[in-house]
Image (cartoon, grey):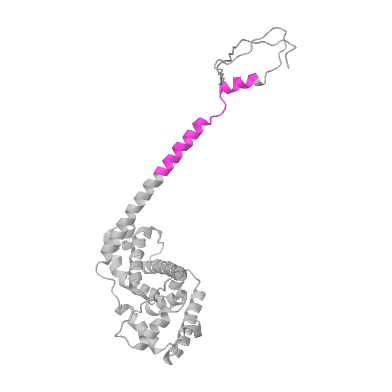
């Protein structure tokens, strides 16, 4: 890994190709879950690796994966903020994010994905990173730039909201307003 | 956290590392490299424009400096006329007159002459 980082620092295109091969799908799927939109996720993933190429000299540790996820998370959060502002100032209605799992999925899974998409962005990214990408709480704390204790409570509160939202969904009632997520 | 629902477990397992459900596409690398190339060009243009602005600023500053120089010898001699020093002797003394005094008149009928003047003790300030 150290050698790969050194090569990246020397602006070696082959090294960047190797890094992309290792992490592109992982980052893309993470951003898909964060944004709920494949096209935007693709753009953000591309921008993530462009930033990796130009900012590699700022990497201090050897944990390239955590660093790449940190870049991707920051870009996704910036994009989410832009989308929020667009939504406020837009006269026409902007369509909600397209749900990702597709038609062949059971309804329950689609509902679960919708619940995840409606979580606030920080608990959402913490849960996704912990449960799907197996990051430790310490790594998530580095990525989100928060203390470990804050990350712990974020994950706990996130799951509490998921549990609360799943109950009315099962009964056929849309629980977004009722549970405040 | 232990009571995570089954549906949520399913979505998590679906996204797990071993089976990433979405593929980013074959042309991903090409797109990234073209974005890098574009950004490099952008940086070059920004750098050239910045250098141009700095150079223009430097030239402007230099010009301003040349036109607002500190008082020269010429200015000092002019100052000596406006604030003459006390003349002690009775004898007439020559007072330096600047050679390049310029007069102008709007009707061109007035005529001017420059002659040397001197101070007597009475005249002195």
Tell which residue pokes out farthest to the bottom in this image: A171
Vertical placement of A72 versus B87: above or below? below
Q: Residue at x 56, y 24 (%)?
A: B72
How many numbered marks appear?
Answer: 0
Q: Considering the image in quadrants, where does the N terminus of chain A appear?
A: bottom left
Point out residue A13 in the picture as x, y percentages from the top left corner: 27, 59
Q: Quadrant of residue B53?
A: top left
Judged from this view, the residue extending furthest toward the left is B26
Residue B48's place in the image compared with A100, above or below, is above
Query: Quick check: A103 above or below B55?
Result: below
Q: Is residue B43 magenta?
A: no
Q: Looking at the picture, tell me which residue is in the foreground, B64 or B110.
A: B110
Q: Residue at x 51, y 30 (%)?
A: B67
Residue B45 place in picture, x, y as percent: 35, 49
Q: Main secondary structure of the magenta part?
A: helix
In the rendered image, residue B71 lying in the magenta stretch gets the answer yes
Q: Is residue A175 above or below residue B39?
A: below
Question: A153 or B25, which lies in front?
Answer: B25
Q: Residue furthest right?
A: B122
On the image, the x and y values in percent for residue A91 come to: 44, 70
Query: Between residues A70 and B123, which one lies in front from this camera angle?
Result: B123
Start and end of the magenta stretch? B52-81
Q: Find residue A38 and report its horizontal and vertical position in percent.
A: 33, 73
- Mark yes or no: residue A127 visible: yes
Whether residue A1 is visible to the viewer of this picture, yes or no, is no
* Snapshot quadrant of residue B107: top right
From the viewer's side, name the closer residue of A98 and B69. A98
């Amino acid at each position: 890994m150290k050698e790969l980082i050194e090569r990246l620092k020397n602006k070696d295109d082959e090294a960047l190709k190797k890094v992309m091969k290792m992490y592109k799908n992982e980052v893309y799927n993470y951003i898909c879950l964060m944004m709920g939109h494949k096209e935007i996720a693709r753009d953000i993933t591309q921008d993530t690796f462009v930033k990796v190429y130009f900012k590699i000299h700022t990497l201090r540790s050897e944990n390239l994966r955590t660093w790449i996820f940190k870049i991707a998370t920051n870009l996704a959060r910036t994009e989410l903020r832009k989308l929020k502002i667009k939504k406020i100032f837009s006269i026409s209605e902007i369509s909600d994010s397209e749900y990702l799992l597709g038609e062949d999925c059971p309804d329950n899974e689609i509902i679960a994905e919708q619940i995840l998409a409606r979580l606030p962005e920080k608990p959402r990214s913490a849960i996704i990173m912990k449960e799907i990408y197996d990051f430790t709480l310490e790594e998530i704390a580095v990525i989100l730039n928060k203390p470990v204790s804050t990350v712990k409570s974020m994950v706990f509160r996130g799951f509490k909201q998921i549990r609360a939202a799943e109950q009315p969904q099962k009964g056929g009632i849309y629980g977004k307003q009722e549970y405040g997520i | 956290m232990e009571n995570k629902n089954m549906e949520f477990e399913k979505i998590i397992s679906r996204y797990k590392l071993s089976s990433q459900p979405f593929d980013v596409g074959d042309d991903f690398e090409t797109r990234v490299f073209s974005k890098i190339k574009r950004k490099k060009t952008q940086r070059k243009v920004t750098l050239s424009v910045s250098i141009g602005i700095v150079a223009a600023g430097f030239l402007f500053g230099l010009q301003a400096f040349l036109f607002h120089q500190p008082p020269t010898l010429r200015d000092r001699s002019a100052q000596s006329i406006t604030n003459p020093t006390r003349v002690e002797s009775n004898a007439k003394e020559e007072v330096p007159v600047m050679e390049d005094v310029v007069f102008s008149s709007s009707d061109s009928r007035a005529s001017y002459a420059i002659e040397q003047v001197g101070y007597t003790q009475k005249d002195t300030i």
